[in-house]
Image (cartoon, rainbow, N blue to C red):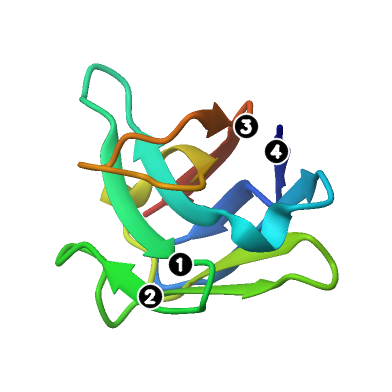
């Protein structure tokens, strides 16, 4: 079982950067794929990026080239580096983990961290 805690959200001006962290508990974290999602008010949850247990990365077109996902299994951590932020990036950001995610379905979720991008 894995417990996830996000941090690093906050208020930033458009064009700025933030780095979100996802800290995981559990001795087998290295076996889990981890993804970042976000959900804005009155919108559906949106997949952003994922990183496999082996380090392969995948991105949604909407963030490709601006966001970077990375992990350090020795620290049980995953990060989402976000650059060139836009007001439309405002949302609650969640990390999620699963040993075998299918069709963007992940079994473990954090509580989320708010990101607000101002004009």
Answer with the quarter of the image where residue 29 lies: bottom right
Mark positioned earlier in the residue sequence (2 or 4): 4
Q: Which residue bears the numbered disc 3?
A: 110
Image coordinates of residue 54 in percent, x first then y, are 51, 77
Q: Nearer the viewer, mark 4 or mark 1?
A: 1
Spatial CA distance of label 2 from label 4 is: 19 Å
As drawn, the residue found furthest toward the top would be 42
Asked if the residue under mark 3 is in contact with the one under mark 4, i.e. CB atoms within 8 Å, the reply is yes
Mark number for residue 82? none
Q: Residue at x 39, y 43 (%)?
A: 37
Mark positioned earlier in the residue sequence (2 or 1): 1
- Secondary structure under badge 2? strand
Relative side of 118 to 95, left or right:
left
Relative side of 76 to 48, left or right:
right
Spatial CA distance of label 2 from label 1 is: 7 Å
Image coordinates of residue 33 in percent, x first then y, are 49, 56
Answer with the quarter of the image where residue 21 lies: bottom right
Q: Which residue bears the numbered disc 1?
A: 52
Q: Which residue bears the numbered disc 4?
A: 4
As drawn, the residue found furthest toward the bottom would be 65
Spatial CA distance of label 1 from label 3 is: 18 Å
Mark number for residue 57? 2
Mark positioned earlier in the residue sequence (3 or 2): 2
Task: Tell which of 1 and 20 is nearer to you.
Answer: 1
Asked if the residue under mark 1 is in contact with the one under mark 2, i.e. CB atoms within 8 Å, the reply is yes
- Secondary structure under badge 4? strand
Task: Tell which of 45 and 78 is nearer to you.
Answer: 78
């Amino acid at each position: 079982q894995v417990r996830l805690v996000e941090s690093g959200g906050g208020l930033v001006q458009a064009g700025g950067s933030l780095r979100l962290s996802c800290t995981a508990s559990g001795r087998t974290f290295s076996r889990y794929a981890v993804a970042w999602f976000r959900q804005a008010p009155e919108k559906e949850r949106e997949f952003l990026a994922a990183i496999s247990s082996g380090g392969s990365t995948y991105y949604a077109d909407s963030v490709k080239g601006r966001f970077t996902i990375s992990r350090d299994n020795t620290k049980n951590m995953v990060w989402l580096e976000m650059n060139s932020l836009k007001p439309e990036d405002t949302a609650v950001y969640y990390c999620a983990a699963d040993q075998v995610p299918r069709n963007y379905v992940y079994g473990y979720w954090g509580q989320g961290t708010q990101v607000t991008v101002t004009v």
